[in-house]
Amino acid sequence: MKFALVGQPNCGKSTLFNQVAGYKAETGNFSGTTVAFTESQVRVMGEVVEIVDLPGCYSLRGTNPAEQEAARYLSSCDINAVIDVADASHLASALELTLELLSLNKPMILALNMMDEAARLGLHINGPALQTELGIPVLPLVASKGRGVKGLFSKALEAGNNPNGKVQQARREDSNDAITRHALAMEIAQKFTTQGERRTSWQDRLDDLLLHPFWGYAVLLIVLLGFFEAVYGLGQLIESPILAFFNHLTSILLSPLSQGSFFYEVALGVMQGIAAGVAIVLPYLLPFLFGLGVLEDVGYLPRIAFLMDAFMHRIGLHGKAIVPFILGYGCNVPAVMSTRTLEEPRDRYMAAALATLVPCAARLAVVFGLVAFYLGPLAAFALYIFNLLVIALTGRILSSLNPENTPGLILEMPSYRMPTFKNIFAKAWFRVREFVVEAWPILIVGSAVLAGLDYFHIASIFNWLIRPLTWVMGLPAQVGVPLIFGILRKELSLVMLGQALGTTNFASALSTTQMVTYATFVMFYVPCLATLSVLRRELGTRAMFSVAALTVVIGLVAALLARGVAIIL
């Protein structure tokens, strides 16, 4: 199936192509000429379609080489549907080309692009009546913001699958000469266009900023930085008094036990596990989940996906893989499960492997509890930016090792809406309940087990097993056990770190460089046991082990890089 994008210069045709084009969009020349066209692939309703972006042309009967080659290409039998992209704010001029395209008698769609600009000018186009007049589907479109793109390509696929449904030819026989065609286009435009008051909706103005090719990314950085500041501020505000309360409570509850005895150490481990869940993890997890829910409900997350689509293609992935990435910031388990929506095994493996590198909410607790709390939120934000760079570099390497054509993404922009507390609370509670029911008991048991290992001096054996790794990173030998147990649940790598070092005041036991190095390694190395289980179920045992090994290598290299930067700074 092949679609041809046709339109006059500056109609937004190439913008539409670039929004949906895959990573491997190719530019070629028409045979025997230097006139170029661009083609790529896009997945429409499960079917891969080839799209060709032809040179902009005012007429199929023009004298310049680009217009001549475009006309010759359109006359071939290789095209299943023609998508005529028209500037809705200059409809009369655009319809002159439309009338010429109709004479080709091919399945055709008229896409009225820049409808937002037409609305600003107060122009109202009666699309259904124009559709009846022309005898072809007429659809509104704002290509720069992704509005109407999905419906356009779905309708083009429908037209391409029904080649016998040719366009109507009423009123077309006399439109062969330029003068008649111009007059007819003016007549049709005046008939179906009314001039109203110039206006711009607040959603349009907001999208102009949030989806801007430069300012959109600037706003995204500001939003993420503000998000980090808010999560850190609330977490810090809550953590200190709750931690002080549990320390006081622990001393009271353990006072009847003999200090240094086995039961005292295990009971202390249990209390430390309980305190860590309430005082260290939840203060950062709750604000993060509420903030994520607000961004999702207000409609900003899809716009982040829209902005990041180009980023996904540059690292060699299908644009649809942005979904696992966004889910990964909450939990890597649903992130890996969502890779089912990707059709190719290569894309599923790459998306799953890279999604496990995304710092989930549990890793967030480590970053905020260790780096943000002692070094400030800017240091934590810098780690997250570094995380994105590492993911991008890893994606490029994996893509070069396994190159493949990647179809583009059709992404529809939803309207902005007011978030409701009920929905946000329900989403946050779902994740918090998962932590309380699944993770918190593991934290408590893990803390008790570590206390027992320390009492019988068995912990040193585990520390010795991975001492080469911790030595290379310049970390104390005691961090071995927290890293091993961290594979069960990532929160354990922070909770048990306090037990292993004998203090929850990490600044007294670790240097600034060591905090950064440890947090960086935890951000990347082997995903939690639940994620490994899902990887095995979705991709197979071999893929699971390869992803686990890959994350260890990436985590080590990233930690060493972070260590070097921390030493320099």
Image (spheres, helix red, strand yellow):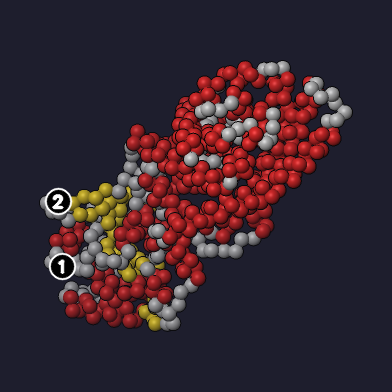
Numbered circle sitting on residue 183: none
Query: Which of the two residues, 97 or 294, is positioned nearer the viewer here?
Result: 294
Image vertical order of residue 394 relative to residue 60, above or below: above
Q: Residue at x 40, y 67 (%)?
A: 140
- Left or right of residue 26, residue 143 in this image: right
Q: CA distance from mark 2 to mark 1?
A: 19 Å
Residue furthest to the right in view is 256
Label 2 crowd bin: few (<14), some (14–19), many (20+), radius 10 Å: few
Amino acid type, mark 1: Gly
Q: Residue at x 72, y 34 (%)?
A: 273
Amino acid type, mark 2: Ser
Residue 502: give x, y in percent of width and height.
69, 29
Query: Which of the two residues, 352 or 211, is positioned nearer the viewer here?
Result: 211
- Left or right of residue 99, residue 382 in this image: right
Image vertical order of residue 47 relative to residue 487, above or below: below
Image vertical order of residue 355 relative to residue 126, above or below: above
User: Mark 1 and mark 2 in contact (Cβ < 8 Å)?
Assistant: no
Image vertical order of residue 454 relative to residue 395, above or below: above
Whether residue 341 is visible: no
Q: Which residue is mark 2?
A: 31
Residue 94: give x, y in percent of width and height.
28, 71
Numbered circle sitting on residue 62: 1
Q: Residue at x 55, y 44 (%)?
A: 380
